[in-house]
Image (spheres, rainbow, N blue to C red):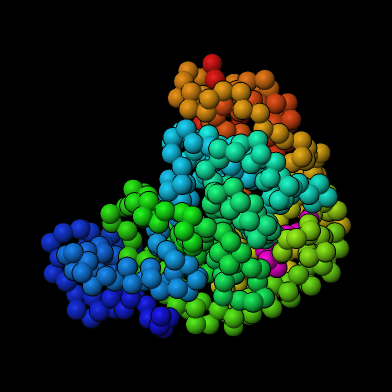
Amino acid sequence: MDQKKAPIVEALAQVERRPIHGFGAPGHNQGAAIPADLRRLLGKRIFAADLLTPKGLDDRTEGAHVVQRAHELAADAWQADFCRFVTGGSTQSLHTALAAVAGPGDTVLFATNVHKAERSHALATGLDAVLVPVLIDDDWDIDHGITPAALSAALAAHPDAKAFVVVSPTYYGVTSDIGALSTICHDHGIPLICDAAWGGAFAFCERLPDDALTKGADIAVYSLHKTMGSLAQGSALLAKGTLVDQQRLWMAFELFETTSPSVPILASLDATRRDHALDGERIWGNVLDRAAKLRRRLARIPGLRVFGEEHLPAATQLDPTKVLIDLSALGVTGYAVDDWLVKHHRVSVGLSDARHLLAVVSIGTTAADVRALVGGLKDLAKQVAAGTADLPPAGVFPGLSTLSVTMAADPEEAFFGEVDHVPIAEAAGRIAAEVIAPAPPGVPRLVPGQRIEAAHVAWLVANRDAGAFFLDPIDPSERTIRVVR
């Protein structure tokens, strides 16, 4: 197919040349009426591009197949058989993928480090979510992916499973051995769904890790907005092979996608696909070179340690544009350093936790950005050494390996039943009735129906007190937790 084409972008340009006299939605009518402050801030063109797909981007019946042709080009670019652009982020893409392979009461295997999106879908639709333990790196206190042995053991214990969901790459840029995992899944006749939100560009640059679809994944979900340049909420859902019913996947997409998808987001997905298909090697070669420079400069700062290929588990790959920095030797937390960098240097990183920062180098990262981060961390290290940083000392934090998962009640009954609110510090032994997912990376540490153990309390209290952000807690103060009555 001609990857130079961008049907959504081209149709949008045509509308700009020949505006429509509209008598439907959106009500601002291509920017004829815009709040004054937004007109000054954003200008009119973003509103002019805010159309509907039928009777706007396309005709009343979408007879020109503008969006459909864009999907076909994207499927071809990723060497897939099916593609849909999704405007509700990869959360929506993952909900769609799961709905295509399993229904209420079905068992689905999830890696323990799946995002809140997968666990929320299981809760809302009545899936039996069985967790497959990931490999914990105690030296770095991060979770990696799934080993073939762990997946084989899970399938032996749950032979009725309908699918397996793995996160690869992880938030920290480490892949699983997708080839080995997909072979195990296919030997059991089930699909492998890869939450590859951070790996959408892998297909377009030889220097990046292997793309999941080329290693046997049946469905892959990519967040093009995370690193590739589309607008926020831009995601792509792709499938390959015959193990997943593509008609059911299509129907699941229609269940979850809005009937008024954002055309600016769709256009940004279309343009991002075209740029990567035509010039991905050069684009990401430059990004990788910039990431390598950042890594070298950070490694020279006293007190910092940078995760590299020498730290990888066997049979995995590293996306070196995800730069994980261990601050333990400085004696301060990543939470405190994150806030300090924003305050003193206007530098914002992708993730902070008790002992880490994660800097994500993407296509929009500039040389000035790299200089600012390096300069900020040099300043920090110097001030910590001199005792002038005015940051609280890091305490003792329980490791991820202390956290286990014991489901003690039906998740739906826990979520929808009678509940109490108790102080987190007193919650050991109770059963959780809400999702607690510190973000980023948004991995649930407690879900409805899970037994709250003393280790969970210790981990949550230590991280909360150090500055962790619990995504969407019922109690915004993060002092109490919703538990089964």
Please tell me in which quadrant of the rendered image residue 61 appears: bottom left
- Residue at x 49% of width, y 62% of height: 240
| Foreground residue among 88 and 242 | 242
The answer to whether residue 87 is above or below residue 67 is above
- Residue at x 59% of width, y 81% of height: 281
Q: Where is residue 76 in the image (x, y as percent from the top left)?
A: 45, 73
- Residue at x 61% of width, y 76% of height: 205
Which residue reaches farthest top? 485
| Foreground residue among 177 and 232 | 177
Q: Position of residue 408 (x, y in %)?
A: 61, 23
In the image, the segment drawn in magenta is: 318-326
- Residue at x 49% of width, y 78% of height: 277
- Residue 261 in view, yes or no: yes
- Residue 336 in view, yes or no: no
The answer to whether residue 112 is above or below residue 200 is above
| Foreground residue among 99 and 459 | 99
Q: Position of residue 354 (x, y in %)?
A: 73, 46
The answer to whether residue 42 is above or below residue 260 is below
Quadrant placement of the C terminus? top right
Quadrant placement of the N terminus? bottom left
Q: Is 323 colored magenta in this rendering?
A: yes
Please tell me in which quadrant of the rendered image residue 385 appears: bottom right
The answer to whether residue 5 is above or below residue 456 is below
| Foreground residue among 68 and 52 | 68
Q: Number of marks in the image? A: 0
Q: Is 466 colored magenta in this rendering?
A: no
Q: Position of residue 15 (x, y in %)?
A: 23, 75
